[in-house]
Image (spheres, coloured by chain):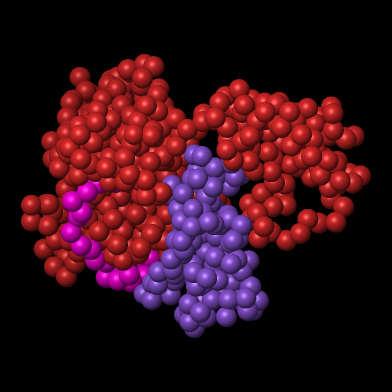
Chain colours: A red, B purple
Amino acid sequence: MTKRVRIGSGSAYWGDMFEPAVALAERGEVSYIGFDFLAELTMSIFQRAKAKDPEKGYIPDLLTLLRLILPAARKHGIKLILNGGAANPAAAGRAVAKLAAELGLTGLRIGTVLGDDILGQLDDLAADGWVFENLDTGERGLDRVRGDIVAAHAYIGSEGIVGALADGADVVITGRVADSALYVAPLMHEFGWTFEDPDWDRIGAAITLGHLVECAECVTGGMSNVWESASCPWDIGFPILDVTDATDGVSAVLEKTPGSGGIVNQWTVKEHLLYETHDPASYLMPDGIGDFTTLQIEDLGDDRVRLTGMSGRARPDTLKAQIGYRDGWIGEGQVVFSWPDAPGKARRGIDFLQHRFAQAGIDPLALDMRFLGVDSLHGDVAPPMPMDPDELCLRVAARTLTREQADVVRREVTHLWTVGGLGTAFGTPSPPRPVIGLWPTLVPRAAVRPIWNVEEVH
Amino acid sequence: MELLADIAYARSGDKGDVCNVGIMAKRPDLYPLVLRCVTPDAVGRHLAGLVSGDIAVYRLDNIEAVNVVMRGALGGGATRTTRFDQTGKAMATALLRMPIEEAS
């Protein structure tokens, strides 16, 4: 029997626009909206916030957004799935329950999903012989960084969200679930799929579809090769998946909020299909493996694209995990040199900085000195500096062992204002920032158990 | 046609210190040229100052695209790098500057 469901995407990152999400709830005719707030660094930031205050550690935007969108979601019966619980989904759930009560949304059922936080399990796993090989560097064993670890989270799959939806949740708040799980979960729930009797092509299709919309505006004309063709980007529409589960498999139409700006066509879908991926035949997710090489894309016009032919394979026995550890500081500054002979002043400015760093005994672990507007993005690939520019902005960033060293870098850049050549400006410098090193690794699936809880607002 | 930008679109992103660039032929008949130009060696030469690790190129014949996956590509990754483009969003446009004859 053919089943259909419409699912929207309401956030790509912490700090994203709110209005397109509200428009999606009001006009998208969707049954679910997924919201992603988490980048690789985010969990460490919020784990530290939670360490300072046990009722913090979730994305503050969560409450701002839900205040705006909950009335429309209630009116249209839309279920919201958000990973904005970050390092503290339980506290986020309590805060959202309080907000819902304040908004008069009695009877709203709020689910929270836990189990991704594996900080407390690292030593036991290590004692059992797990080596936590660093997927970037190949380094084995956490001994070198163990004392500096601030967060460790596994990317968990859709089970906890599916469980909360089955228990009647209207809003589901999670921590570090895989982005695609925000979309795989409602499809599993609606279509009655299970991991006990899995159809991996169907689940692979769900993973592919989830990946396509998980960055919201990035598939509707944002960050796009065809951005110039996107209408009214200030009113950009967020994406909608109209998914069909039929006897011959899963297909979908990707579209966007009716009456919104932006653009959906074959290019916006193709560019996002490959975004932040490795082997396209093996998109490894906790719920299964998506194979992008069988997907067929058909441009229907009018900002609609049909997606067919998707496939997948069985989920791996390991889960990806991200371990964050304190890893020094970055000091940064900018200074703008003026005509006449801005390049000459800039060269002397760099010479000045190198002497001052040496005098202060600073030997940065990494140092980047590039000119904004010239070669800060493309480095040596950029064309030569233009002749006689009216101004030239030198940006300096250094990674150091200590905060004090990083602050020297910032101070010395500002000194070019007065010790440098005529007509030099430095804007407003930012303070040194702590560096969180990331240790991507795998952990055994069996060691990670998603758990969920659903409570009603009174 | 002189640059990769003349025959393809591209978009880049990050995962740790790995940067990938999805490259899409602008027309199906340009896909063979994209395949000939975008090789690990050619990309490695063009981005020598930005990428220090291994480079792999994966084909997607179904959408006339390739995915270039580059290790050691972001100065240690978004959280550690001292680069201005912390997440490698402009790696795609750097690669689109690659001259076609350099690669062929």
Residue A51, placed above or below residue A422: above
Residue A422's spot in the image, x, y percent?
A: 90, 34
* Image quadrant assignment for residue A163: top left
Residue A317's spot in the image, x, y percent?
A: 18, 51
Q: Quarter holding the N terminus of chain A?
A: bottom left
| Residue closest to the eye, B47 or A205 | B47
- The main secondary structure of the magenta stretch is strand
The number of discs equals 0
Residue A272's spot in the image, x, y percent?
A: 43, 58
- Read off the magenta span: A293-320
| Residue closest to the eye, A403 or A297 | A403
A166 on left or right of A114: left
Residue B63's spot in the image, x, y percent?
A: 40, 73
Please report the residue visible at 30 percent of the width from the left and 36 percent of the height from the top: A153
Query: In the rendered structure, does residue B33 fall within the stretch colored magenta?
Result: no
Please report the residue visible at 59 percent of the width from the left and 72 percent of the height from the top: B4
Please report the residue visible at 25 percent of the width from the left and 33 percent of the height from the top: A122
* Image quadrant assignment for residue A303: bottom left
A256 on left or right of A420: left
